[in-house]
Image (cartoon, helix red, strand yellow):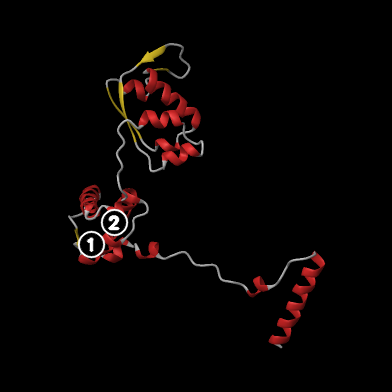
Amino acid sequence: KPGRFEIAHRGTLFLDEIGDLPLALQAKILRALEEKQFERVGGTQSLHVDVRVVAATNRNLKQRVAERLFREDLYFRLSVFPIQIPPLRERGDDVLILARQFIDRFCKDLSKKPLSLAPSAVDELKTYAWPGNVRELQNCIERAVILTEGDAIHQRHLNLSFRQVSSPQPVASPWDQIDLSGTLAEAQRRVAGEVERRKIELA
């Protein structure tokens, strides 16, 4: 059956998450871009196509090339007109524009009356770092629309506070202070001595 390149003939093909493609598939993509031809799976005849390709990724492709996880020739072939989109946390009030768009969409999908954003929700949306970018925002708003029973989405509906808690730091153990250098027998004697000392302290 016709594949994506064939269907996109004389049109545009969008390749999302191009940085995660396996190397074998990267070679096939490169050939289609360079020679404008390919074979169907199981086919023997080359098909010629004229396709504009738009590719997107959240990976650092230069780093992937250095790690030999992405073909350098494909990287330069795709970098004809690169567009760098900053993360959501660096785009100011864009987060509010997108949030309101998602609210309208999900209210319609869920047959709910239109909802507004309470000031507490606006502050939360603007201060949160959004490590998952637009996808995380979309999921957050969908959950908030489901949970909201009134006329406005409040901070509690976003449920973002738990995401900003920093990872707990490892607690230092007093056993880390024991010198375990030397032979195994010497280290065992030091540990045994520390155990006896602690027994005395607790007695």
Residue labelled with disc 2:
146
Percent x, y of residue 158:
30, 61
Left or right: residue 47 compared with residue 97: right
> What's the mark number on residue 122?
1
Q: Nearer the viewer, mark 2 or mark 1?
A: 1
Percent x, y of residue 63:
45, 41
Location of the C terminus by quadrant is bottom right
Residue drawn at (37%, 40%) of the image: 57
Residue drawn at (38%, 63%) of the image: 164
Left or right: residue 82 compared with residue 151: right
> Which sits in the foreground, 153 or 56?
56
Question: Which residue extends farthest top?
Answer: 45
Residue drawn at (31%, 42%) of the image: 84
Query: Which secondary structure lies at badge 1?
Result: helix
Residue drawn at (29%, 39%) of the image: 83
Percent x, y of residue 74:
42, 29
Q: From this view, report whether residue 192 is shown above or below residue 26.
A: below
